[in-house]
Amino acid sequence: MRLALAQLNPVVGDLRGNAKRILAAARSASAEGATLLLTPELSLWGYPPRDLLLQPARLALQSAVLDGLVKQLDGLCSLLVGVALPCDDNRAPGLYNGIALVDQGGWRGVACKQLLPSYDVFDERRYFRPGDGPCLLTMAGGERLGLTICEDLWVEDALQRERLAGPDPIAALVEAKPDLLINLAASPFDPSKPALRRQLTGQAARRLNCPVVYLNQVGGNDELVFDGSSLVVAPDGSTLLELPACREAVQVWDSGCPQQAMAPPSQTPSREELLLRALVLGVRDYAGKCGFQRALLGLSGGIDSALVAVIAAAALGPENVSTMLMPSPWSSSGSIDDATALATRLNLQTHTVPIQELMQGFDASLTPALGQPPQGVTAENLQSRIRGTLLMAVANQQGQLLLTTGNKSELAVGYCTLYGDMNGGLAVIGDLYKTSVFALCNWIDSPEARDCREDLGLPQQGDLVGEAIRCKPPSAELRPDQKDSDSLPDYSELDPLLKGLIQERTTPQALVAAGHDIALVERVQRLLQRAEFKRRQAAPLLKVSPQAFGSGWRLPIAAGGLCSAGPD
């Protein structure tokens, strides 16, 4: 068979538009002699459709859209399309996460997902019923295709951290001896995922002694970024074909002549390159799919806003990104100069709006109520809220998407201001620890990033972030000579603790046993819990780690029983 892998970027809920994307891929693939086009999991809906699946009118539209596809396939290849298949009874949930075979004779469901994830960002058991038994499709030419959907491939205890309770869809296909295994997926990005997917796909190929096609969705849908990185592996697990990361692609592969397949890339992208590409894709699609063409952000001269500026320029083009400098009496001349130089390097438009007079106005207005001018943290937060208000006003007036510039470390411990620096429509680096921000910026300014920068439309020569910004001690500059280290542990100490508590769910006692100071562990854990109310009101962020502060973080705000780091 000549199979076409359509690594598509759907818009969630746009069934008609997604069908047009599938049809365009089918025309391109058929022109190259493909006989069957593969599309990702729930490709007709876009993943994840969430409660759109509960709308009867949209479910009825799915049938009409599939019928329309059938009518337009004259002379084109057959399709495997990710759909929501209705169950035969009225029990809830009433759908399967399924695959439909669409050809000139009609369409029919041919496979149902057996393992339904309901962890982290996934909530499939809210909408779907698990499929029962192996899915084997025999084509007109006699080819026997094993069909699985995303999580159905994640069944190797030795390779993955957790495996869902339930059947092993790969084992169920061993006796059937398929000629080819197909896995249609919508697997969100994190930097460790591409390598793990290759291992899982290779293990499935060895177990079944047949090639495996892994086809992943690409694109950003709200907080989730899907990197594509689809591939085909041989029966021995070696890679025959690999599609690019973070971009749409349609690639034809001849299963009868595997050695004619396109060779995999000679050099696997680095972790930093994949991370940058994913963030750029996430911003581009969040803006585009929400109807924004332009973005705005505040530039402080610090490393966080510098990184967001680089990402925004690559995602939307520098001509579509505006920045504001809002110096206070405590802003250093170096930070103002650094912010201006960064904007010049990136060709970004800048506006400077000093806030000293606004600060004085707030002081005068609040003094009667407080009996004195605002002091301490209250005065510092007012500066942040003045800036946040200015940014929101400009973004509203000019129809721009306001990008927040806070990082995960700050969001974790509450080192951020509600209705201030947290204002905005998207938290671009809200899933990057501060140490990760420094690491990514160092890579961006390294020679290794030149090809990637060119591909993303960024200047290739010289630094982008700049040494002055990369080497500057972090500071909010809300009072004289302020440093982040005045209020927080050094990020080299803080971030490992946060990763342990957030991502690894490590107990405080285990962190102390690993060598961390008991008082510091208890302090960080206390800050993490107390900041939950801020995170609940934060802008949506781009998830690029195994555990982000998004829909997969489900802790109560009002909670007690804080664990001690000491012995029980």
Image (tube, rainbow, N blue to C red):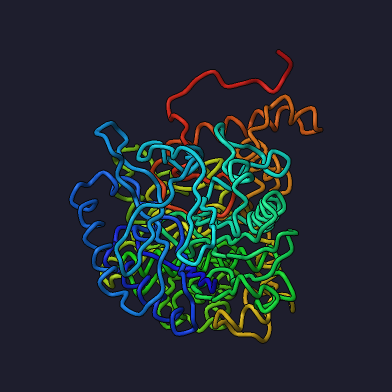
Which residue lies at the image location 35% right of the left edge and 74% below the top edge? 23
Left or right of 511? Residue 381 is left
Residue 386's place in the image compared with 32, above or below, is above
Which residue lies at the image location 44% right of the left edge and 85% below the top edge? 31
In the rendered image, residue 404, in percent from the top left (x then y), is placed at: 45, 59
User: On the rendered image, what quadrant is the C terminus found in?
Assistant: top right
Nearest the viewer among 113 and 52 is 113
Nearest the viewer among 453 and 405 is 453
Residue 21's place in the image compared with 554, above or below, is below
Left or right of 406? Residue 382 is left
Q: Quadrant of residue 359?
A: bottom left
User: On the rendered image, what quadrant is the N terminus found in?
Assistant: bottom right
Left or right of 182? Residue 100 is left
In the rendered image, residue 7, in percent from the top left (x then y), is placed at: 49, 68
Nearest the viewer among 459 and 233 is 233
Q: Can see residue 327?
A: no
Q: Can see residue 123?
A: yes
Residue located farthest toward the left when viewing the structure as drawn:
57
Nearest the viewer among 366 and 49 is 49
Q: Quadrant of residue 344?
A: bottom right
In the rendered image, residue 287, in percent from the top left (x then y), is placed at: 38, 67
In the rendered image, residue 525, in percent from the top left (x then y), is placed at: 61, 31
Which residue lies at the image location 21% right of the left edge and 57% below the top edge? 61
